[in-house]
Image: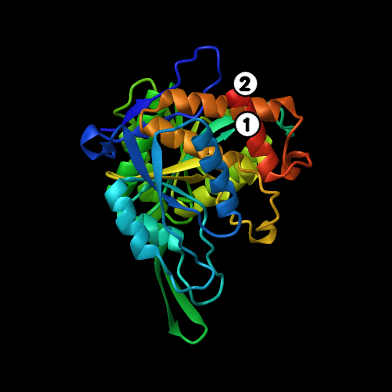
Protein backbone atom coordinates (compact mmCIF):
# COMPACT_ATOMS: atom_id res chain seq x y z
CA UNK A 1 0.00 0.00 0.00
CA UNK A 2 1.10 3.49 -0.68
CA UNK A 3 1.11 5.91 2.20
CA UNK A 4 1.07 9.67 2.14
CA UNK A 5 3.14 12.24 3.91
CA UNK A 6 1.41 15.60 3.86
CA UNK A 7 2.06 19.14 5.01
CA UNK A 8 0.39 19.79 8.33
CA UNK A 9 -0.88 23.25 7.50
CA UNK A 10 -4.62 23.79 7.66
CA UNK A 11 -4.52 27.38 6.44
CA UNK A 12 -2.76 26.61 3.17
CA UNK A 13 -4.31 25.46 -0.07
CA UNK A 14 -3.65 21.89 -1.11
CA UNK A 15 0.03 21.74 -1.85
CA UNK A 16 2.58 19.25 -3.02
CA UNK A 17 1.31 15.99 -1.60
CA UNK A 18 2.96 12.77 -2.67
CA UNK A 19 3.29 9.13 -1.71
CA UNK A 20 5.87 7.01 -0.01
CA UNK A 21 6.28 3.35 -0.69
CA UNK A 22 6.34 0.83 2.21
CA UNK A 23 9.28 0.96 4.61
CA UNK A 24 10.70 -2.25 3.12
CA UNK A 25 11.35 -0.55 -0.20
CA UNK A 26 12.24 2.95 0.96
CA UNK A 27 15.87 3.98 0.42
CA UNK A 28 18.27 3.03 3.17
CA UNK A 29 19.79 5.74 5.32
CA UNK A 30 23.51 5.61 6.02
CA UNK A 31 24.69 7.78 8.88
CA UNK A 32 21.35 9.58 8.81
CA UNK A 33 21.72 10.45 5.10
CA UNK A 34 20.07 9.26 1.89
CA UNK A 35 21.81 8.63 -1.41
CA UNK A 36 19.69 9.86 -4.34
CA UNK A 37 20.33 9.26 -8.02
CA UNK A 38 20.67 12.54 -9.94
CA UNK A 39 20.16 12.51 -13.71
CA UNK A 40 20.59 16.13 -14.90
CA UNK A 41 19.30 15.31 -18.39
CA UNK A 42 19.54 17.39 -21.54
CA UNK A 43 18.93 21.07 -22.33
CA UNK A 44 18.46 23.13 -19.18
CA UNK A 45 18.63 20.05 -16.96
CA UNK A 46 22.04 20.75 -15.44
CA UNK A 47 21.18 24.39 -14.69
CA UNK A 48 17.94 23.61 -12.86
CA UNK A 49 19.31 20.59 -10.99
CA UNK A 50 22.25 22.77 -9.94
CA UNK A 51 19.66 25.10 -8.38
CA UNK A 52 18.36 22.21 -6.29
CA UNK A 53 21.88 21.21 -5.27
CA UNK A 54 22.64 24.78 -4.21
CA UNK A 55 19.47 25.03 -2.12
CA UNK A 56 19.93 21.61 -0.51
CA UNK A 57 23.55 22.39 0.37
CA UNK A 58 22.59 25.72 1.93
CA UNK A 59 20.09 23.95 4.21
CA UNK A 60 22.25 20.92 5.00
CA UNK A 61 19.61 18.57 3.61
CA UNK A 62 20.81 15.03 4.46
CA UNK A 63 21.12 13.85 0.86
CA UNK A 64 24.15 12.72 -1.10
CA UNK A 65 23.86 12.81 -4.88
CA UNK A 66 24.95 9.97 -7.14
CA UNK A 67 25.13 11.74 -10.50
CA UNK A 68 24.64 9.79 -13.72
CA UNK A 69 24.96 11.58 -17.06
CA UNK A 70 22.46 10.38 -19.64
CA UNK A 71 21.67 12.12 -22.91
CA UNK A 72 19.28 11.53 -25.75
CA UNK A 73 20.91 14.13 -27.99
CA UNK A 74 23.54 11.79 -29.47
CA UNK A 75 20.97 8.97 -29.90
CA UNK A 76 23.37 6.38 -28.44
CA UNK A 77 21.51 5.93 -25.16
CA UNK A 78 24.80 6.32 -23.32
CA UNK A 79 24.37 6.04 -19.56
CA UNK A 80 20.90 4.45 -19.49
CA UNK A 81 22.11 1.13 -18.07
CA UNK A 82 24.17 2.97 -15.43
CA UNK A 83 21.14 5.09 -14.53
CA UNK A 84 18.94 2.02 -14.14
CA UNK A 85 21.49 0.33 -11.87
CA UNK A 86 21.86 3.51 -9.79
CA UNK A 87 18.10 3.80 -9.35
CA UNK A 88 17.87 0.13 -8.41
CA UNK A 89 20.44 0.75 -5.68
CA UNK A 90 19.04 4.01 -4.38
CA UNK A 91 15.33 3.52 -5.17
CA UNK A 92 14.77 7.25 -5.59
CA UNK A 93 15.98 9.78 -8.10
CA UNK A 94 15.76 13.39 -9.29
CA UNK A 95 15.78 13.72 -13.05
CA UNK A 96 15.90 16.35 -15.75
CA UNK A 97 14.23 15.68 -19.10
CA UNK A 98 16.04 13.64 -21.71
CA UNK A 99 15.81 14.73 -25.35
CA UNK A 100 13.86 12.45 -27.68
CA UNK A 101 14.58 12.81 -31.40
CA UNK A 102 11.64 13.05 -33.78
CA UNK A 103 13.33 11.18 -36.63
CA UNK A 104 12.86 7.54 -37.53
CA UNK A 105 15.68 6.43 -35.26
CA UNK A 106 16.23 6.98 -31.58
CA UNK A 107 13.97 5.69 -28.84
CA UNK A 108 12.75 7.81 -25.95
CA UNK A 109 15.15 7.32 -23.05
CA UNK A 110 12.54 8.78 -20.70
CA UNK A 111 10.13 5.99 -21.67
CA UNK A 112 12.92 3.40 -21.54
CA UNK A 113 13.74 4.27 -17.93
CA UNK A 114 10.10 4.09 -16.85
CA UNK A 115 9.50 0.78 -18.58
CA UNK A 116 12.73 -0.81 -17.37
CA UNK A 117 11.91 0.03 -13.74
CA UNK A 118 8.12 -0.27 -14.15
CA UNK A 119 7.62 3.29 -12.91
CA UNK A 120 4.03 3.17 -14.01
CA UNK A 121 2.34 6.21 -12.42
CA UNK A 122 3.06 9.80 -13.36
CA UNK A 123 1.72 12.43 -10.96
CA UNK A 124 1.58 16.05 -12.16
CA UNK A 125 0.22 18.87 -10.01
CA UNK A 126 -1.46 21.75 -11.84
CA UNK A 127 -2.13 24.67 -9.53
CA UNK A 128 -2.14 28.46 -9.68
CA UNK A 129 0.92 30.00 -8.03
CA UNK A 130 0.38 33.29 -6.19
CA UNK A 131 2.22 36.07 -7.97
CA UNK A 132 2.05 34.48 -11.41
CA UNK A 133 -0.60 36.12 -13.53
CA UNK A 134 -2.82 33.72 -15.46
CA UNK A 135 -6.06 34.02 -17.37
CA UNK A 136 -7.97 31.82 -14.92
CA UNK A 137 -7.88 31.49 -11.13
CA UNK A 138 -8.87 28.66 -8.83
CA UNK A 139 -6.99 25.97 -10.76
CA UNK A 140 -5.96 23.04 -8.57
CA UNK A 141 -6.02 19.56 -10.06
CA UNK A 142 -3.82 16.50 -10.17
CA UNK A 143 -3.13 14.55 -13.34
CA UNK A 144 -2.38 10.84 -12.95
CA UNK A 145 -0.98 9.33 -16.14
CA UNK A 146 -0.22 5.71 -16.97
CA UNK A 147 3.44 5.60 -17.98
CA UNK A 148 4.12 2.20 -19.52
CA UNK A 149 1.58 1.27 -22.21
CA UNK A 150 -1.00 2.84 -24.53
CA UNK A 151 0.40 4.69 -27.53
CA UNK A 152 3.83 4.73 -25.89
CA UNK A 153 4.20 0.93 -26.04
CA UNK A 154 6.77 1.47 -28.80
CA UNK A 155 5.39 -1.33 -30.97
CA UNK A 156 5.26 -0.15 -34.54
CA UNK A 157 6.51 -1.33 -37.89
CA UNK A 158 6.20 -0.66 -41.59
CA UNK A 159 4.23 -3.59 -42.97
CA UNK A 160 4.54 -2.31 -46.56
CA UNK A 161 6.34 0.75 -47.94
CA UNK A 162 4.22 3.73 -46.98
CA UNK A 163 2.06 1.69 -44.57
CA UNK A 164 2.86 1.86 -40.85
CA UNK A 165 1.15 -0.12 -38.12
CA UNK A 166 1.45 1.34 -34.63
CA UNK A 167 0.06 -0.79 -31.83
CA UNK A 168 -1.72 0.74 -28.85
CA UNK A 169 -1.65 -1.76 -26.00
CA UNK A 170 -4.22 -1.48 -23.20
CA UNK A 171 -4.50 -4.06 -20.43
CA UNK A 172 -6.93 -4.49 -17.57
CA UNK A 173 -4.06 -5.06 -15.13
CA UNK A 174 -2.30 -1.77 -15.90
CA UNK A 175 -5.56 0.16 -16.19
CA UNK A 176 -6.60 -1.15 -12.78
CA UNK A 177 -3.37 -0.31 -11.00
CA UNK A 178 -3.26 3.27 -12.37
CA UNK A 179 -6.91 3.68 -11.38
CA UNK A 180 -6.14 2.47 -7.85
CA UNK A 181 -3.22 4.90 -7.68
CA UNK A 182 -5.51 7.76 -8.70
CA UNK A 183 -8.22 6.87 -6.18
CA UNK A 184 -5.68 6.33 -3.40
CA UNK A 185 -4.24 9.75 -4.13
CA UNK A 186 -7.72 11.29 -4.07
CA UNK A 187 -8.61 9.59 -0.79
CA UNK A 188 -5.41 10.55 0.99
CA UNK A 189 -5.45 14.14 -0.26
CA UNK A 190 -9.10 14.97 0.40
CA UNK A 191 -10.06 15.10 -3.26
CA UNK A 192 -13.59 14.13 -4.13
CA UNK A 193 -13.71 13.47 -7.88
CA UNK A 194 -11.74 11.21 -10.20
CA UNK A 195 -12.31 11.70 -13.94
CA UNK A 196 -11.25 9.06 -16.47
CA UNK A 197 -10.05 10.57 -19.75
CA UNK A 198 -10.56 8.41 -22.86
CA UNK A 199 -11.63 8.18 -26.49
CA UNK A 200 -13.95 5.21 -26.05
CA UNK A 201 -16.45 6.57 -28.52
CA UNK A 202 -13.96 5.66 -31.28
CA UNK A 203 -11.51 3.20 -29.69
CA UNK A 204 -14.25 1.15 -28.14
CA UNK A 205 -12.17 -1.83 -27.04
CA UNK A 206 -8.90 -0.25 -25.84
CA UNK A 207 -10.18 3.00 -24.35
CA UNK A 208 -13.46 1.30 -23.50
CA UNK A 209 -11.50 -1.11 -21.29
CA UNK A 210 -9.69 1.77 -19.59
CA UNK A 211 -12.90 3.74 -18.99
CA UNK A 212 -14.81 0.79 -17.58
CA UNK A 213 -11.91 -0.34 -15.40
CA UNK A 214 -11.62 3.08 -13.78
CA UNK A 215 -15.36 3.08 -13.10
CA UNK A 216 -15.18 -0.44 -11.63
CA UNK A 217 -12.28 0.48 -9.32
CA UNK A 218 -14.17 3.58 -8.19
CA UNK A 219 -16.92 1.45 -6.70
CA UNK A 220 -14.55 0.48 -3.89
CA UNK A 221 -13.91 4.09 -2.83
CA UNK A 222 -16.87 5.52 -0.96
CA UNK A 223 -17.06 9.29 -0.81
CA UNK A 224 -15.19 9.76 -4.10
CA UNK A 225 -17.22 10.42 -7.22
CA UNK A 226 -16.08 8.96 -10.55
CA UNK A 227 -16.97 10.23 -13.99
CA UNK A 228 -15.42 10.28 -17.44
CA UNK A 229 -14.72 12.66 -20.32
CA UNK A 230 -13.74 12.12 -23.94
CA UNK A 231 -10.24 13.52 -24.39
CA UNK A 232 -11.12 16.20 -26.95
CA UNK A 233 -13.92 17.50 -24.73
CA UNK A 234 -11.59 17.33 -21.73
CA UNK A 235 -9.08 19.50 -23.60
CA UNK A 236 -11.76 22.10 -24.29
CA UNK A 237 -13.01 21.96 -20.70
CA UNK A 238 -9.44 22.36 -19.43
CA UNK A 239 -9.09 25.75 -21.08
CA UNK A 240 -12.70 26.84 -20.49
CA UNK A 241 -13.38 25.71 -16.92
CA UNK A 242 -10.42 23.87 -15.36
CA UNK A 243 -11.78 24.56 -11.86
CA UNK A 244 -14.18 21.62 -12.34
CA UNK A 245 -11.30 19.13 -12.31
CA UNK A 246 -9.94 17.43 -9.20
CA UNK A 247 -8.06 14.27 -10.20
CA UNK A 248 -7.73 13.22 -13.83
CA UNK A 249 -6.59 9.67 -14.65
CA UNK A 250 -5.42 9.09 -18.20
CA UNK A 251 -3.69 6.71 -20.57
CA UNK A 252 -0.23 7.78 -21.65
CA UNK A 253 -0.77 10.05 -24.65
CA UNK A 254 -3.77 11.93 -23.27
CA UNK A 255 -1.88 12.69 -20.07
CA UNK A 256 1.00 14.14 -22.05
CA UNK A 257 -1.35 16.48 -23.91
CA UNK A 258 -3.31 17.56 -20.83
CA UNK A 259 -0.20 18.19 -18.74
CA UNK A 260 0.99 20.66 -21.37
CA UNK A 261 -2.42 22.36 -21.43
CA UNK A 262 -2.31 22.54 -17.64
CA UNK A 263 1.15 24.10 -17.71
CA UNK A 264 -0.03 26.80 -20.09
CA UNK A 265 -2.98 27.54 -17.80
CA UNK A 266 -0.84 28.39 -14.77
CA UNK A 267 2.13 30.11 -16.39
CA UNK A 268 4.31 27.64 -18.23
CA UNK A 269 6.33 24.41 -17.96
CA UNK A 270 8.80 25.97 -15.53
CA UNK A 271 6.18 25.93 -12.78
CA UNK A 272 4.78 22.39 -12.87
CA UNK A 273 6.24 19.76 -10.52
CA UNK A 274 5.88 16.05 -11.05
CA UNK A 275 6.84 12.57 -9.92
CA UNK A 276 6.80 9.01 -11.19
CA UNK A 277 6.07 6.05 -8.94
CA UNK A 278 6.45 2.30 -9.25
CA UNK A 279 6.22 -0.55 -6.77
CA UNK A 280 9.83 -0.04 -5.67
CA UNK A 281 11.19 3.11 -7.26
CA UNK A 282 10.29 6.78 -7.43
CA UNK A 283 11.73 9.37 -9.82
CA UNK A 284 10.94 13.07 -9.48
CA UNK A 285 11.08 15.42 -12.46
CA UNK A 286 9.29 18.48 -13.85
CA UNK A 287 5.72 17.51 -14.66
CA UNK A 288 5.65 19.17 -18.08
CA UNK A 289 8.45 17.41 -19.88
CA UNK A 290 10.21 20.18 -21.79
CA UNK A 291 13.93 19.84 -22.50
CA UNK A 292 14.70 23.53 -23.18
CA UNK A 293 17.48 22.96 -25.69
CA UNK A 294 16.87 26.43 -27.13
CA UNK A 295 17.85 28.16 -23.88
CA UNK A 296 20.53 25.75 -22.71
CA UNK A 297 23.49 27.49 -21.09
CA UNK A 298 21.86 30.93 -21.05
CA UNK A 299 21.16 30.92 -17.29
CA UNK A 300 17.57 32.04 -17.95
CA UNK A 301 15.60 28.85 -17.17
CA UNK A 302 12.99 28.83 -14.44
CA UNK A 303 14.03 26.17 -11.88
CA UNK A 304 10.72 26.30 -9.94
CA UNK A 305 9.34 23.03 -11.34
CA UNK A 306 12.53 21.19 -10.48
CA UNK A 307 12.74 22.76 -7.02
CA UNK A 308 9.13 21.86 -6.21
CA UNK A 309 9.70 18.36 -7.60
CA UNK A 310 12.66 18.04 -5.24
CA UNK A 311 10.37 19.09 -2.38
CA UNK A 312 8.07 16.22 -3.37
CA UNK A 313 11.12 13.95 -3.22
CA UNK A 314 11.86 15.15 0.31
CA UNK A 315 8.31 14.42 1.42
CA UNK A 316 8.58 10.97 -0.12
CA UNK A 317 11.60 10.40 2.15
CA UNK A 318 9.78 11.78 5.19
CA UNK A 319 11.92 14.94 5.30
CA UNK A 320 8.85 17.14 5.57
CA UNK A 321 10.43 20.02 7.46
CA UNK A 322 13.03 20.56 4.74
CA UNK A 323 10.37 20.18 2.06
CA UNK A 324 8.07 22.74 3.66
CA UNK A 325 10.81 25.31 4.13
CA UNK A 326 12.08 25.00 0.56
CA UNK A 327 8.66 25.08 -1.10
CA UNK A 328 7.52 27.98 1.13
CA UNK A 329 10.62 30.00 0.27
CA UNK A 330 10.11 29.30 -3.43
CA UNK A 331 6.48 30.43 -3.37
CA UNK A 332 7.38 33.49 -1.28
CA UNK A 333 10.09 34.53 -3.74
CA UNK A 334 7.68 34.30 -6.66
CA UNK A 335 4.87 36.10 -4.79
CA UNK A 336 7.17 38.94 -3.78
CA UNK A 337 7.92 39.54 -7.45
CA UNK A 338 11.30 41.23 -7.07
CA UNK A 339 13.28 38.31 -8.47
CA UNK A 340 11.70 36.20 -11.18
CA UNK A 341 12.79 34.59 -14.42
CA UNK A 342 11.92 35.74 -17.92
CA UNK A 343 9.16 33.17 -18.52
CA UNK A 344 7.03 34.67 -15.74
CA UNK A 345 7.63 38.31 -16.55
CA UNK A 346 10.95 39.01 -14.90
CA UNK A 347 14.53 39.64 -15.93
CA UNK A 348 16.40 37.59 -13.33
CA UNK A 349 18.73 34.74 -14.14
CA UNK A 350 18.38 31.16 -12.92
CA UNK A 351 21.23 31.81 -10.50
CA UNK A 352 19.70 35.04 -9.15
CA UNK A 353 16.35 33.34 -8.58
CA UNK A 354 18.05 30.46 -6.79
CA UNK A 355 20.08 32.85 -4.61
CA UNK A 356 16.89 34.72 -3.68
CA UNK A 357 15.35 31.51 -2.43
CA UNK A 358 18.47 30.71 -0.41
CA UNK A 359 18.39 34.22 1.07
CA UNK A 360 14.80 33.69 2.22
CA UNK A 361 15.68 30.33 3.69
CA UNK A 362 18.56 31.83 5.65
CA UNK A 363 16.70 34.92 6.79
Q: What residue is drawn where x is 63% and y is 44%?
A: 270
Pick out the residue farthest to the top.
11
User: Which quadrant of the figure contains the N terminus?
Assistant: top left
Q: Nearer the viewer, residue 99 or 249?
A: 99
136 lies left or right of 287: right
Q: Residue furthest bottom?
A: 161
Most foreground residue, 126 or 201: 126
- 320 displayed left or right of 361: left
**For numbered disc 2, what is the local secondary structure?**
loop
- Which label sits on residue 191? none
Q: Quadrant of residue 7?
A: top left
How far apart are the alpha carbons under marks 1 and 2? 10 Å
* Residue located at (60% from left, 39% from top): 304
**Would you say residue 321 is visible in this rendering?**
yes
Q: How many C-alpha atoms fall within 10 Å of the one at disc 2: few (<14), some, or many (≥20)?
A: few
319, 16: nearer the viewer: 319
Q: Residues within 10 Å of mark 1 (few under 14, many from 20)?
A: many
Residue 254 coordinates in the image, percent (x, y): 51, 50
Please state the horizontal and vertical placement of residue 168, each as a whole percent of the image: 40, 62
Mark 2, residue position: 363
Question: At x 50% / y 36%, what residue is drawn?
Answer: 56
Amino acid sequence: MLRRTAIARTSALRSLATYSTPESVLPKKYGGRYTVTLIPGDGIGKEITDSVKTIFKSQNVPIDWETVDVSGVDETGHGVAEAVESLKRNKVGLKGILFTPTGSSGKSLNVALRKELDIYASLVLIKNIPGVKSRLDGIDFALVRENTEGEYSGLEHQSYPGVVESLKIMTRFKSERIAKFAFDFAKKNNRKLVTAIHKANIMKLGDGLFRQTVKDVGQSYSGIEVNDLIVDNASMQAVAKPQQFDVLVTPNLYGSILSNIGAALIGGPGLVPGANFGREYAVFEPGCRHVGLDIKGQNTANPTAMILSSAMLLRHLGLNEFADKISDATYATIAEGKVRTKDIGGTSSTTEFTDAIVEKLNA
